[in-house]
Amino acid sequence: MVLHGPGRPLAVETRPIPVPGPRQLLVKVAACAVCLTDLHIVDGDLEHPALPLVPGHEVVGRVQSAGPGTEGRFPAGDRVGAAWLGRTCGQCRFCAAGRENLCDDAVFTGYTADGGYAGYMLVDERFAVRIPDRYGDAEAAPLLCAGLIGYRSLVMAGDAGRLGIYGFGAAAHIVAQVAVAEGRRVYAFTRPGDADGQAFARSLGCVWAGGSDRPGPEPLDAAIVFAPVGALAPAALSALDKGGIVVCGGIHMSDIPTFPYRLLWGERRIASVANLTRSDAAAFMDAAARIDIRTSIECFDLAEADTALENLRRGRLQGAAVLVPRRSGPPGLP
């Protein structure tokens, strides 16, 4: 499924199966989750995608073959994941400092390189992710971004015992389960009036769920904002106790409106999470192997990618949409 321009439907195309180059794995896609970032790319909110582009960066599949220079970490038949960070330069000041998520010359899966809305894709062996056996392919797919970015956001929130989550979608429903397993009190802030979303949050262990238009029952030590709504940043600040932090966990957000300094005073902070590192992936997958994370998914055929994106755009999903290439899908996919 190929994007040829912002705002245009994805096109069904038949392409030759790609040949892996140096350090690359050829992966047969088993499942690819649909991320809010995919929607930002398709809608043109994120500029300069590598058009024509195959979106998708929450990919689970099986290795078919390897190109020259690979180290044999993943033999043919192994299950691997491909995430947003597809490759880094390894040489810039950020890579040298262990902050490869800020690499000056990074390649991003499904944005500046073809991703997983396809039957096959190429993955840099060094950035492939090993997935715990306890998860099926479709259930594991949201872990590759919703889980990874959510986990990095949770780590940035520190040891906050009272954690607020604004926007209860794919990332939130995963990170809430991790936070609850760690013994934190989690407060879910949804769209006002979203009774189903609030009930879903409570079913996952949140101690409170309500609309984002009002504060929770007690001050928060930290808040994570997943919804791409800039106005939620000062709302989250106003819900913090002194010394708290608001972590903005999305790659795109509407402008944050001005707010009075008193909301920031008291050593409150606002921070953003940018991308992820391979160490984030390893740490989160270790946690996912220990914690029985229940991913709420709705599966779509690969040819239904536009429908899945529209459901995400309209807020019709509870959890994550997952594309599954099937034999009944687009022609040309062996």
Image (tube, rainbow, N blue to C red):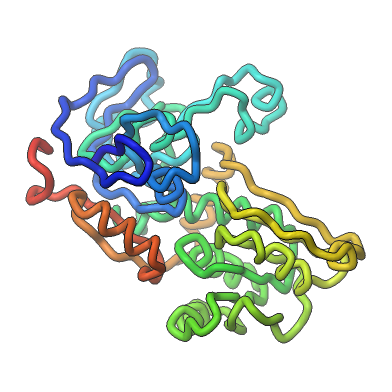
Could one spot residue 127 in this view of the protein? no
Q: Is residue 155 left or right of residue 194?
A: right
Q: Which image quadrant: the C terminus?
A: top left
Snapshot quadrant of residue 22: top left
Residue 300: image x %, image y %?
Answer: 23, 58
Q: Nearer the viewer, residue 11 or 115?
A: 11
Question: Which of the 4 image quadrants contains residue 160?
Answer: bottom right
* Residue at 40% from the left image edge and 55% from the top image edge: 142
Q: Nearer the viewer, residue 89 or 49?
A: 49
The percent position of residue 296, horizontal first and vertical second, equals: 37, 68
Rendered position, 298 above or below 28: below
Residue drawn 7% across and 51% down? Answer: 328
Residue drawn at the location 28% of the way across and 49% of the way down? 31
Residue at 56 percent of width and 23 percent of height: 105
Give residue 285's position: percent from left, percent from top: 49, 50
Looking at the image, how many numbered discs can be counted on the residues?
0
As drawn, is 129 to the left or to the right of 252? left
Please state which of residues 232 and 241 is positioned toward the viewer in this rendering.
Answer: 232
Identify whether 98 is placed above or below 83: above
Q: Decide: is 310 above or below 206.
A: above
**Residue 324 appearing in the image:** yes
Q: Is residue 124 left or right of residue 177?
A: left
Q: Can you say which quadrant of the picture contains the N terminus? A: top left
Q: Is residue 190 above or below residue 154?
A: below
Horizontal and vertical percent position of residue 193: 51, 84
